[in-house]
Image: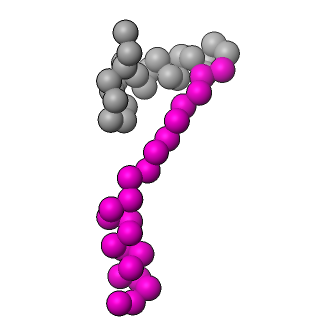
Amino acid sequence: MTLDSRISELAQVAKPTVAIIGLGEVGCNIVMYNAKRYVGSHKPRT
């Protein structure tokens, strides 16, 4: 197995995780904008 094929295999199974923290008015607006449009795998909390 070559290094390139190993990297490709890992990239296919990797599930990136991103956390958004909204600070201040602009940060909160960005979080709400993404939440309303179901960005990511989770539905927004109501």
Quadrant containing the C terminus in the rendered view: top left
Quadrant containing the N terminus in the rendered view: bottom left
Q: Nearer the viewer, residue 17 or 24?
A: 17
Total marks placed: 0
Q: Residue at x 32, y 64 (%)?
A: 12
> Residue furthest toward the bottom?
1
Quarter holding residue 3 = bottom left
Residues rendered magenta in the picture:
1-23
Question: What percent of the width, then of the height, locates residue 35?
Answer: 40, 22
Q: Nearer the viewer, residue 46 or 35?
A: 46
Position of residue 39 relative to residue 9, above or below, is: above
Position of residue 7 relative to residue 25, above or below, is: below
Residue 14 shown in magenta: yes
Residue 41 shown in magenta: no
Question: What percent of the width, then of the height, locates residue 7?
Answer: 42, 75
Q: Residue at x 59, y 27 (%)?
A: 21
Quarter holding residue 34 = top left
Position of residue 16 relative to residue 42, above or below, is: below
Question: What percent of the width, then of the height, locates residue 10?
Answer: 38, 69
Q: Residue at x 36, y 35 (%)?
A: 40
Q: Residue at x 37, y 19 (%)?
A: 44
Position of residue 17 relative to residue 33, above or below, is: below
Colouring of the image: one colour
Quarter holding residue 25 = top right
